[in-house]
Amino acid sequence: MASTASVHPDDVDTLKAMLVAIAAEKSELRDETAELKAEIVRMATLNDTLKSGSPICI
């Protein structure tokens, strides 16, 4: 059986850099998720307003 090269770097500094990048991306995704959830709430509120027949100010 032929041995395969590891797909993960074995350099500690490279691994640390990868973990930092992953943490940063995770943080960005959390921020984006929060923004999208807030937009959903705003849209649902607007939808409810429109369904009730109340006038809206844009």
Image (spheres, rainbow, N blue to C red):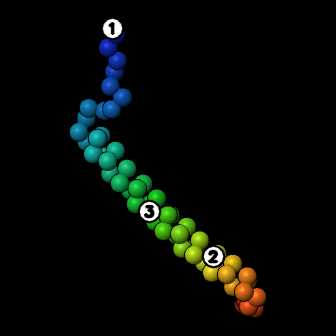
The N terminus sits in image quarter: top left
The residue positioned 72% from the left and 86% from the top of the image is 52
The spot of residue 10 in percent (x, y) is: 26, 32
In the picture, residue 48 is in which quadrant? bottom right
Residue 2, given in percent of the width and then of the height, sits at 34, 10
Q: Residue furthest left?
A: 12
Q: Nearest the camera: 43 or 48?
A: 48
- How packed is label 3: few (under 14 Cα within 10 Å), some, or many (20 or more)? few
Closest to the observer, 56 or 18: 56
Disc 2 and disc 3: Cα gap in Å?
21 Å
Nearer the observer, disc 2 or disc 1?
2
Residue, disc 1:
1
Determine the CA span between mark 1 and mark 3.
Answer: 43 Å
Q: Label 1 amino acid?
A: Met
Label 2 neighbour load within 10 Å: few <14, some 14-19, many 20+: few
Most foreground residue, 15 or 42: 42
Name the residue located 75 percent from the left edge and 91 percent from the top edge: 55
Q: Is residue 22 left or right of residue 52?
A: left
Q: Is residue 12 above or below residue 52?
A: above
- Give the residue pinned by disc 3: 30
Q: Relative to 54, does residue 1 appear above or below in the rendering?
A: above
Q: Earlier in the sequence, mark 2 or mark 1?
A: 1
Residue at left offset 60%, top offset 78% = 42
From the image, tell me which residue sits under label 2.
44
Which one is in front in this view, the residue at disc 2 or the one at disc 3? 2
Would you say residue 22 is visible in this rendering? yes
Image position, residue 14 (x, y; %): 30, 40
> How many residues crowd mark 1 within 10 Å: few (<14), some (14–19), many (20+)?
few
Q: Residue at x 25, y 42 (%)?
A: 13
Secondary element under disc 1, as helix, strand or loop, is loop
Q: How many angstroms separate mark 2 from mark 1 (CA)?
A: 58 Å
Q: What amino acid is found at the position of numbered circle 3 in the picture? A: Arg
